[in-house]
Image (cartoon, rainbow, N blue to C red):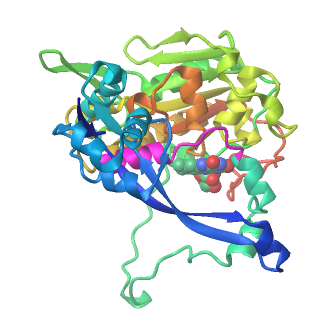
Amino acid sequence: MRIRRCSVLWLEPREVAHVELAGLLAGGTGVVSRIQWQAHAPQLPEAVDVDAEDVALLGELSPRDWSASAPLRARHGAARVRRLLQAGLLVGSTKPWSAARALDERFRDQHWHGLAATWHAASRWDGIDAAGEVEEAGLLTAEGLRATYGAPPAVAHDRGPAEARIGLPRAARTALDALLDARATCRNFDPSVALPLAQLAQVLERAFAARGQVQGADDFDVLKRTSPSGGALHPTECYLIARHVDGLPRGLYHYRPLEHALQPLPFDSADVADPAAYRAQAPRDPLDFLAWIAVGGQQWFAEAAALCVLAPRFHRNYWKYRNHPKAYRVCILDIGHLSQTFLLSATELGLGSYVTAAINEVDLERAFGLTHWVDGPLAICGIGPRAGRMTTYELDPNRKAWPRG
Ligand SMILES: Cc1cc2nc3c(=O)[nH]c(=O)nc-3n(C[C@H](O)[C@H](O)[C@H](O)COP(=O)(O)O)c2cc1C
């Protein structure tokens, strides 16, 4: 058999701490730290603990060229080589390793930049109640943040003397100003009011529909959307958790930009974590719980009538920008543009809306059948009718979203 290293690998000497009873009893903190090597191979579900000799072995191998396995086994031991093959950090040339080899080759064919892939994989959350953690740490309010972290950097950044500044003319206000000023992140949805399907459809059409189509070359179609997209490739897909939309059964959907249509997707509550393992506030209904855990336990966002999960098909971009150090950044920036159009379109209809990246990607991947390095989610935009009263804080200094409140 021949062996090579998996295509992308980052070895992290992570400092880990644990509490030792003897130290505690001796009157100290008992906290002992040590270095634990972690192998990040982004196509795997999570990082793998390895030891210093594993690191040495992995450092001997090419990700492209095959090496004979016998000398490797002689140097490092057959058990070690087998363990690293089983973990997916090494790739074997023979039949027993064909599934792992196919996975590695499929990942290689996506053309990720190695560091971007590592960052993307390592920044995913699985079942994190982020809102609960933030609240427990007292970081939910501005006062709590100020008390814990001190003052933030100043709101305006000075780069020279005030007298040298050139004042700019103010433009006459137009309808666009009114719309831009009315947009505010909504943290107060009315869960008792359904979102009309026509309104959801209007926002989806404005943000995600194909507004035109051209053929760049044979088998190379290019979409026109209202937002720009790096390379005109528009990799971002929109998946929907429809909780309370009038005229649309509750469930999961995939938006089709060419036909402006929703493709129903299967929803299996077995793919959703057990709400009983979370705070009492976590909804018990599986679809509502999926919405809640999707936004990291942020109840104020989970109550949106519909949640749009934005997930690029990375290879649509990486097909052109192969192994490119900027390509992942472009995918993220694309989502920023799409979400702003989404928010403004919702605002125009008098609806509440938000965007968040504080999402549990792994829970969403499970529910929608996505693979993080193929079409993993990066953000969620929520939409729904606003509540009549503000119970969760919103930044609306000009009282546009809350004229009366
Ligand atoms: C990328 C991004 C992520 C955000 N994530 C969250 C979030 O997780 N929770 C939240 O309450 N607000 C989130 N927000 C909303 C911001 O807190 C909000 O935009 C900010 O407070 C300014 O208020 P405004 O949007 O009403 O102008 C996010 C905004 C952006 C652009």
Q: Between 159 and 221, which is closer to the camera in this rendering?
A: 221
Query: Is the N terminus in the top left, top right, bottom left or bottom right quadrant?
Result: top left
Measured from the top left, where is residue 316 in percent x and y? Answer: 29, 29
Measured from the top left, where is residue 231 in percent x and y? Answer: 23, 37
Measured from the top left, where is residue 41 in percent x and y? Answer: 39, 43
Q: Residue furthest left?
A: 217
- Badge count: 0
Compared to residue 351, the image places residue 172 above or below, namely below
Residue 126 is drawn in which quadrant? top right
Measured from the top left, where is residue 355 in percent x and y? Answer: 57, 42
Q: Residue furthest right?
A: 280
Q: Is residue 170 left or right of residue 380?
A: left
Query: Which residue is drawn at the image coordinates 49% and 35% (left, top)?
Result: 45
The verdict on residue 338 being magenta is: no
The verdict on residue 120 being magenta is: yes
Compared to residue 81, the image places residue 270 above or below, namely above
Residue 329 in sight from this viewpoint: no
Compared to residue 227, the image places residue 324 above or below, namely below
Residue 155 in sight from this viewpoint: yes
Q: Which residues are magenta?
A: 114-129
Q: Between 79 and 61, which is closer to the camera in this rendering?
A: 79
Compared to residue 305, the image places residue 64 above or below, namely below
Residue 11 is drawn in which quadrant? bottom left
Query: Which residue is drawn at the image coordinates 67% and 43% (left, top)?
Result: 128
Q: Between 228 and 103, which is closer to the camera in this rendering?
A: 103
Query: Which residue is drawn at the image coordinates 48% and 18% (left, top)?
Result: 255
Q: Is residue 30 left or right of residue 88?
A: right
